[in-house]
Image (cartoon, helix red, strand yellow):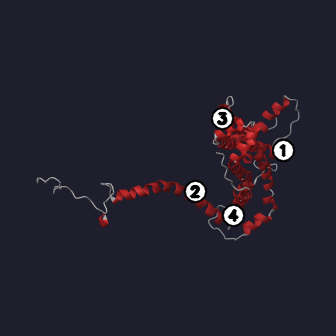
Amino acid sequence: MAIAAPGSATTDAPAARTAPEGRPDRRPSGVTTRQRVVRRLTPYLFLAAAVGLLLLLTYWPAVNLVWYSFTDWDGLDLTKNFVGFDNYVQVFTDPRIFQVFGVSLYYFAASFVQMGLALYFAVVLSFSTRFQNLFRGILFFPYLLNGVAIGFVFLYLFQPGGTLDTVLSWFGVTEPPQWLGNPDIANWSLAGTSVWRYMGMNFVLFLGAIQSLPNDTYEAAELDGANRWQQFWAIVFPGIRRVIGLSFILAISGSLSVFEVPFIMTGGANGTSTFVIQTIQTAFNFRQVGLASAMAVVLLIIVLLVTWIQRKLFPDEKVDLT
């Protein structure tokens, strides 16, 4: 091996790699082009499965739903005759179809009670309270239960001679009303069931939003002599306004698309049929899948339109309490 003179490079040393135009190559040694391509594509490969399932199970059925709404398909025949807008004309001209939207008003009114109770408990349990974790779990627990199980539980609660009638008899009520048999009371009973079930979701949303507010504002308010009620209107309510707006949107869409509770408890009888129940009955009981698809598309458009109007009337406002 040749011995180099001091200050000179050996002849056997590898020459430094240089990029084009004389710039040094900063790429890590040992990384091939294939490995670099795999590194760049790895995030997209992880997303491909989720996006593929979303397209296959959500957007493709939605496209088929729109196509079925322009046909007279009965759900069984292989042929689908194109009928244009006839199904949509029937949806808007048949009074039996649109009158069920009146049932949604019961659930819409109950949603305000639900949000009011959820906001009250969230404010109370956001401050230092004895057994607050226990009460939080109790309030959120109904939302974890399956809707079918809740329907059967409240079905036994409201049936004649059931749990509710037994409790009322202890207080001298000998002739309680037909909670599910009377058309004037049935929808209120079902709406009350929905309040009990979904209050936990709003409670968690409100509680998380309240706890995200800075504690310095509460300390400053206490130094100024503000009580809890004044702190709520000056700090809590403005700080969670966006979450309240989100809950209002969910209340509108939820009241228009109620299904599980009335379907399990009454099957839509005694004037409790909702638009979703009527859509399913039209598709599977009367074999009018084309008409039912048009009803589903109309419901989607109504929900989007109401949401857009709500966003225009009550736009988001930036709230900075820091």
- Can you give x and y, in whole percent of width and height, for residue 305 in the image? 72, 61
- Can you give x and y, in whole percent of width and height, for residue 56 in the image? 55, 58
Q: Which residue is mark 1?
A: 185
Q: Nearer the viewer, residue 273 or 130?
A: 130
Q: Nearer the viewer, residue 268 or 276?
A: 276
Q: Nearer the viewer, residue 314 or 169?
A: 314
N-terminal of the two: label 3 or label 1? 3
Q: Which residue is mark 3?
A: 137
* In this view, 148 is above or below 302: above
Q: CA distance from mark 3 to mark 1?
A: 31 Å
Q: Amino acid at mark 2?
A: Leu
Left or right: where 81 falls relative to 4? right
Q: Amino acid at mark 3?
A: Gly
Q: Secondary structure at mark 2?
A: helix
Sort mark 4 into few (<14), some (14-19) or many (20+) by Cα contacts within 10 Å.
Answer: many
- Can you give x and y, in whole percent of width and height, for residue 152 in the image? 72, 40
